Amino acid sequence: MLVALPFIYEYPIKVQLSILLFFLVISYVNRRARIAVGSLAGAYLGFKILAPVMGWTFFLFKAVAWFGFYIYFFQKAVRYAITSFDYILGDGLESLIRELDKHGR
């Protein structure tokens, strides 16, 4: 069988169709039953569809957040490396040595 209905999938196809026909007739006759059957079907489909979608959405937002975290700190590390490299290549190292010699360290 291609379609597995919740709660009644272990019954033969004729029994499943008769149960669905019974629900269809009841929901056609009575408004409250129509709302109940529609709510149950909507809740089941919502659970089957929204649960995986929410899981994927959570992991997608988490991946974006971690990616932003890595980009931020990678940029910070590159900035520190460039600043340090500029300090060493400029007269920063010489002035540091002069200050250390001045204080006798």
Image (spheres, grey):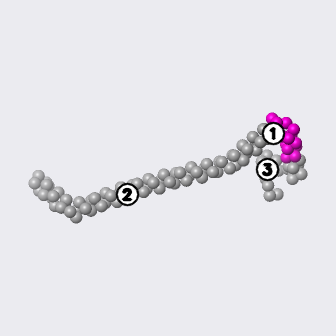
Sequence-wise first label, 1 or 3 = 3
Which of 18 and 103 lies nearest the eye of the viewer? Answer: 18
Total marks shown come to 3
- The image shows residue 15 at horizontal and vertical percentages of 88, 49
Q: What main secondary structure does the magenta stretch of the protein show?
A: helix
**Residue under the image location 44 percent in, 53 percent down:** 69
**Residue bearing the label numbered 1:** 34
- Is any atom of residue 19 visible in this view? no
Sequence-wise first label, 2 or 3 = 3
Q: Is residue 50 left or right of residue 93?
A: right
Magenta-tinted stretch = 19-34
**Callout in the foreground (2, 3):** 2
Which of 70 and 32 lies nearest the eye of the viewer? Answer: 32
**Residue under the image location 34 percent in, 60 percent down:** 78
| Amino acid type indicated by mark 1 | Arg
| Amino acid type indicated by mark 2 | Gln
- Under circle 3, the secondary element is loop
Give the residue at the far top of this rendering.
32
- Crowd class of label 1 (few under 14; some 14 to 19; many from 20; radius 10 Å): some
Q: Quick one: quadrant of the N terminus?
A: bottom right
- Under circle 1, the secondary element is helix
Which of 105 and 79 lies nearest the eye of the viewer? Answer: 79
Quadrant position of residue 87: bottom left
- The image shows residue 40 at horizontal and vertical percentages of 76, 41
Inter-mark Cα distance, 2 to 3: 53 Å
| Amino acid type indicated by mark 3 | Leu
**Residue under the image location 40 percent in, 54 percent down:** 72
- The image shows residue 20 at horizontal and vertical percentages of 85, 46
**Residue bearing the label numbered 2:** 75
- Is any atom of residue 30 visible in this view? yes
Quadrant position of residue 38: top right
